[in-house]
Amino acid sequence: MKRLRIEHATGFTYPGEVSASYNEARMLPGSTDSQFVLSSQLDVEPATNVHQYVDYFGTRVAAFDVLAAHAALSITARSLVEVRSRPLAHSAMGWDVLAREAGRAVATVEMMGQTPRTEPHGEVAEIARGIAGAHENPSRAAVAIAEAVRGAVEYMHGITGVHSTAAEAWTEGKGVCQDIAHITLGAMRAVGIPARYVSGYLHPIAEPEVGVPVTGESHAWVEWFAGRWEAFDPTNGIEIGDRHVLVGRGRDYNDVPPLRGVYAGPHNSQLHVEVTITREA
């Protein structure tokens, strides 16, 4: 188990004053069976009232409006979280039972359909069907699918954008964690495995030194249902460990963006993002 301190600073600089902005932030982790939030807070500048709630998918949301004129918006999320590993524990559920059980609950039914972001390229669907056909256990097939995607897509910044789809990233053969998660989700759903997108943070060092802050970034991985919800990090090809901090879950990135909003004012705002992660214990 590790104790991680996370500071996520983001926001916008505008080319001139804006008269108002309306925003939602999904930057604060919640307590789960594998992590416990010791403290968390969200600071907004210009200062304003922040309304917090939990959305439909169970993600903490901070909603706020800035109604005074401003030329910049700054949001900083600070969290201290104790995290433990989530080792895979594949159930013995087979494909026939999965097909029957997955259709009985809203939580799984909603994670079976493709979205415009996850709709798989034809090659991906074919690869997924081949892997599924070689595995009697859907959960083990899910891991094999994630590993196949990782082996085929190179991690690289600057090739795709925040609005890129799984099919576009597959065609490029390159992308970031968001793209790799979307491709993996599309492949799993193509063979009948309910799967969901997970957003959070990852400490970039496997065994970080206590008290040393490092530059991190938002991260994405996947979960799937095959008797129970399991998780895997397809970008790094690893199980979810005690350096993964979960923030939100959804059908794809659109359900869990760290920051979403609109404003009234000049176009061409500049986004800035800085994530710092420190192991405290």
Image (spheres, rainbow, N blue to C red):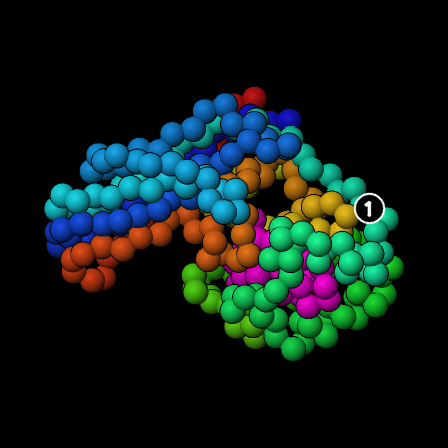
Q: Position of residue 276 (x, y in %)?
A: 43, 36
Which residue occupies 16% across, 57% down? 265
Callout 1, which amino acid? Ser
Q: Residue furthest front?
A: 104
Where 37 falls versus 220 (above or below)?
A: above
Camera sees residue 206: yes
Residue 237 in the image: above or below residue 113: above
SS type, badge 1: loop
Q: Residue at x 50, y 23 (%)?
A: 38
- Left or right, residue 224 beside residue 213: right
Instruction: State the image coordinates of residue 33 (x, y, percent, origin top left).
Output: 64, 32
Q: Is residue 234 left or right of residue 278?
A: right
Q: Is residue 40 above or below residue 24?
A: above
Residue 181 sits in quarter = bottom right
Question: Residue lying farthest bottom?
Answer: 122
Check the picture and name the quadrant holding the N terminus: top right
Q: Nearer the viewer, residue 158 or 190?
A: 190
Locate the C terminus and report the quarter of the image it occupies. top right
Percent across and percent down for residue 229 are 70, 46
Q: Nearer the viewer, residue 223 or 85?
A: 223
User: Which quarter of the figure has residue 242?
Assistant: top right
Task: For label 1, count other residues whose C-alpha is less than 10 Å away and answer few (under 14), some (14-19) or many (20+).
Answer: some
Q: Residue at x 71, y 58 (%)?
A: 103
**Residue at image mark 1:** 91
User: From where the camera sits, is residue 137 visible?
Assistant: no
**163 part of magenta stretch:** no
Q: Which residues are magenta?
A: 173-198
Relative side of 273 to 29, left or right:
left
Does 174 appear in magenta? yes
